[in-house]
Image (cartoon, helix red, strand yellow):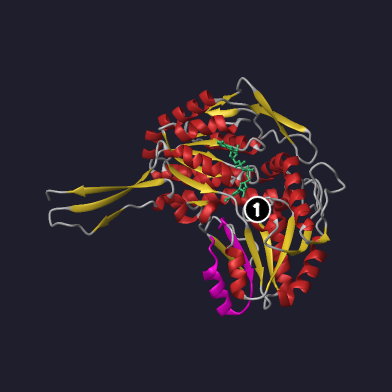
Amino acid sequence: MSLPSEIFTDKAYIAGQWRQGERRFNVTNPATDEVLAEVPDLTADDARDAVAAAEAAWPAWRRQPVKQRAALLRAWFDAIMANQESLARLMTLEQGKPLAESRGEVAYGASFVEFYAEEAKRMAGETLPSHGVDKRILVFREPIGVVAAITPWNFPLAMITRKCAPALAAGCPVVIKPAEATPLTALALAKLAAEAGFPEGVLNVVTASRPAEIGEVLTTDPRVRKVSFTGSTPVGKRLLTQCAGTVKKVSLELGGNAPFIVFDDADLDAAVEGAVASKYRNSGQTCVCTNRLLVQAGVYDAFVEKLAARVAQLQVGNGLEEGVMQGPLINQAAVEKVTSHIDDALAKGGRLVCGGEPHALGGTFFQPTVIADVNAEMRVAREETFGPLAPVFRFDTDAEAIAMANATEFGLAAYFYASDYRRIWHVMEGLEYGMVAVNEGILSTELAPFGGVKESGLGREGSHHGLDEFTELKYVCVGGL
Ligand code: NAD
């Protein structure tokens, strides 16, 4: 499979220059295990160069008239959308998700660039009533400074634009450290940004196979003023600790354990469609993926039957093939985690309804799986599976459903299907989550604040709230008037 030459590059991007790096590491296609490319395996020194370049670019970047920053973002957006198909193919090659999902991710990722090109113009300060006749209170909203963006493999494009677009719009230069499994999409984005005309040092990409070495620089260098991380909760906690030494502002988009609740007054067919979209998209490898299905006793059997029938139709295969709805998992460790959750659930009394095994295609392909009669003692109740396993719990009352949904240290996304409006209000208010979807299986959009509570993270991405994460308030007291 040839790589799309119009966007492909195998070099890192620092200070407006393409960097080869002394060492290189392989990027492989999870659907075929074929090596796609080698990219630079950069070091702490390279990371410091990127930080220095960003720091040097900052004074001019923050002073650029906002309409110029907005125009550059708009040009980047246009370039991403003009290359939607090649970006989607590149993403499917290195990440495995079906082409239709990759196309959707390009559009979703680009929407943040478009949104913040517009929102930059509304980064207003304020004047407040003052505390003396001879004084005035001014509040400036200023860019925070150099931003480090550390991103995961499951959304190789959108997790980068969701951070970089608001940072750049606010007047902050960025250093991106993409996931080692999916650096090609990040480098393609840098190539398009360079072509769009961003000044040297404003956007840098540091690829590396040993993320801790780069992470150490990005979290301890005093020139970095903000770290925005999306990834697993353990790594997020470690980075938060590392950032404490220089008191950086930190945003964390971490793991989830999303409940998907089906009440007895729900439209079951709609609930099944929502559950399939929320559970099996990207082979179950999204942070907002349903992890636990909680179904009320009266509709439990009917729902499980309908879900199993729908799941049986999911076509598994190479994401580049037409009609495929579930690609491979990212690597063998992911397969082992799903398998261990299934084994644990079945050993503790779970009932296998469909799937349950690695797929006959081999490699890291896995059968879409449904397990019924699941209980709180099983690992699936507490841990993020990050794979195509739908465990179905049973509950009787609304209070029980809310308590089960909240019985986790995570609080990213929750979903529920119901029709009674009083129930909808009570459940919506009772869920301890950063995001709640009512009668919907998918909720991400650039127009809304995305993020979690509890151990799912800090801060929000998207909407005007996403811009605030990259700004500081400066209060100026003007006296002697
Ligand atoms: P991960 O934590 O292993 O890696 C994420 C990023 O951190 C990668 O770029 C990786 O190279 C880097 N990294 C790892 N160790 C590091 C260190 N010591 N210092 C600096 N960087 C380091 O996560 P993953 O496996 O790539 O992604 C899956 C996880 O991400 C899941 O838990 C998922 O829920 C979460 N996720 C969350 C969101 C969200 O918005 N909340 C979105 C997507 C994924």
Q: Residue at x 47, y 35 (%)?
A: 219
Front in this rendered view, residue 177 or 352:
352
> In this rendering, would 1 be left or right of 462?
right
Residue at position x 16%, y 53% in the image: 135
Quadrant of the rendered image holding ligand 1: top right
Q: Nearer the viewer, residue 189 or 70?
A: 189
Image position of 43 (left or right of 219): right
The magenta span reads: 409-433
Residue 174 in sight in this render: yes
Task: Name the residue located 24 percent from the left edge and 47 percent from the top edge.
Answer: 476
**Left-right relation of 376 to 367:** left
| Picture layout, residue 371 above or below residue 267 | above
Residue shown at the point (62%, 70%) measured from the top left: 401
Q: How many labels does the image show?
A: 1
Query: Cβ of disc 1 within 8 Å of ligand 1?
Result: no
- Can residue 75 be seen at all in this image of the molecule? no
Categorize mark 1 by other alpha carbons within 10 Å: few (<14), some (14-19), many (20+): some
Image location of residue 290, percent across then percent down: 66, 59
Residue 416 lies in magenta, yes or no? yes
The outermost residue toward the right is 360
Residue type, mark 1 in image: Glu
Residue receiving disc 1: 383
In magenta segment, residue 128: no
- Above or below, 420 relative to 294: below
